[in-house]
Image (cartoon, rainbow, N blue to C red):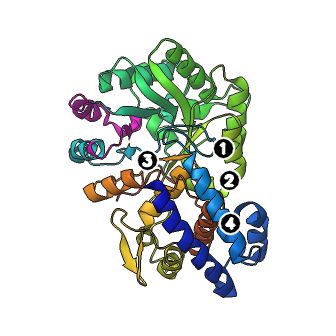
Amino acid sequence: RHLSFTFQFSARLCEVTCSLFSARSPDSVLPQSSIERKSSARALSSSALSCFGMGFQLLTGMLLALSVKGDSDPNGHPKGPAVGIGVGNLPPDQIDSVMRVAHAAGIRLVDTAAASNNEHLIAATNKELSPPMAVETKVWYTHLGYNRTVISVEKSLKALQVDKINIVLIHWPRCNDDIPWMNCAEEEAALPDDVKVAGPAPHLAGPDDEKPWIGSWRALEDMKTQGKIGAIGVSNFDVHELRELVNLATTRPHMLQNSVWSFFFDQELINEARKHGIFYQAYSVMNAFLPQFHSERFPHQSQEWARVISALGAVTGFGSAIVKEGFKLMNERELLIAYLTAEGVGVIPKSSKSEHITANAKAAGALDTLPRHLRNHLGLLLEEWLRATHGQPPRNPHPDEGDL
């Protein structure tokens, strides 16, 4: 089945990408310097190979696909859960139904955070699922520092009604008042007294003080050793913070969770994570890409996306396919998730719609056997579309924004 899928997708992609790159107007592409920067590594120019050469590479990729086992990462990237369900911003009365739909679709990871105050709701549903879903939660920036982090994890253990949490991440390396939605002093003042006396307010740490997240990391390491946590990691760390963490850590971080924008526009961070075998998980996947979230700001975006998906057509019998220009196409959500998971990136899209949750689960892994040069085309097109329709990537997007 996978080989048949690869053949259909690859053959059509070879045809349409040649015509696409040769026919596009100068106004619809990135500045040449941006494409030149990645062309040798990521793009197959229509002028670089003859039709015979392209067909030969396609055949080679298909033969290689025969040797790829279903439980392996064909790219050698760090392995982790391909797709989970995010419930951090869901209304409380939707969590039970969303988890049940996700579980039925084969999703086995639920992502939340201590700051979401819904771990007890996850526990109530999870105890009725067989097998129960793995839980990924996070320590909020108000609880940075060794003792405060211990309090946070112990509270999560109690709320989740487990002896061991599957994955715990440091949610942010710091609270920063320059980020509009962070309210450092107000959140500190609202903390219970037992947290306040457990350690100094992390947002007041000076340049000569140890960074509070370092104490948090040591706490996570110790609690992992004690058997209270399965895997530990960080979220929203930049490349400098990640390097610092790797240098001081006794236990290598298993996961780095950052915005999907970092995957496309911060190659230094991605390379650093992969260098150390750290699994990359992306949030804000849907609202970073789907046209309806930005149609007022970028009215030409829908046409740009239509061009991209038209160029990547001929995917048949897949989920909630749409029909455009005579070809069955994978829709935006499915195509993006399929691409990211093929690149070894985990995704945790948030959704309250049953049909979307099911389609997301089916999309994960759908392009895993697609030949590398064709997947490179897809990545380049997605990046071009992002630049053409969104401008510069947003800084510090809220991890709980958006719902589909």
Q: Nearer the viewer, mark 2 or mark 4?
A: 4
Q: Earlier in the sequence, mark 2 or mark 1?
A: 1
Q: Amino acid at mark 2?
A: Asp
Q: Nearer the viewer, mark 1 or mark 4?
A: 4
Bounds of the magenta span?
104-130
Q: Amino acid at mark 4?
A: Phe
Nearer-the-camera pick, 122 or 195 = 122
In the picture, the disc for residue 345 is none
Nearer-the-camera pick, 49 or 98 = 49
In the picture, the disc for residue 238 is 1
Left or right of 118? Residue 44 is right
User: How many neighbours does mark 2 have within 10 angstroms: few (below 14), some (14-19), or many (20 or more)?
Assistant: few
Left or right of 3? Residue 278 is right
The answer to whether 250 is drawn above or below residue 292 in the figure is above
**Residue 268 visible in the displayed image:** yes
Count of labels in the image? 4
Q: Secondary structure at mark 4?
A: helix
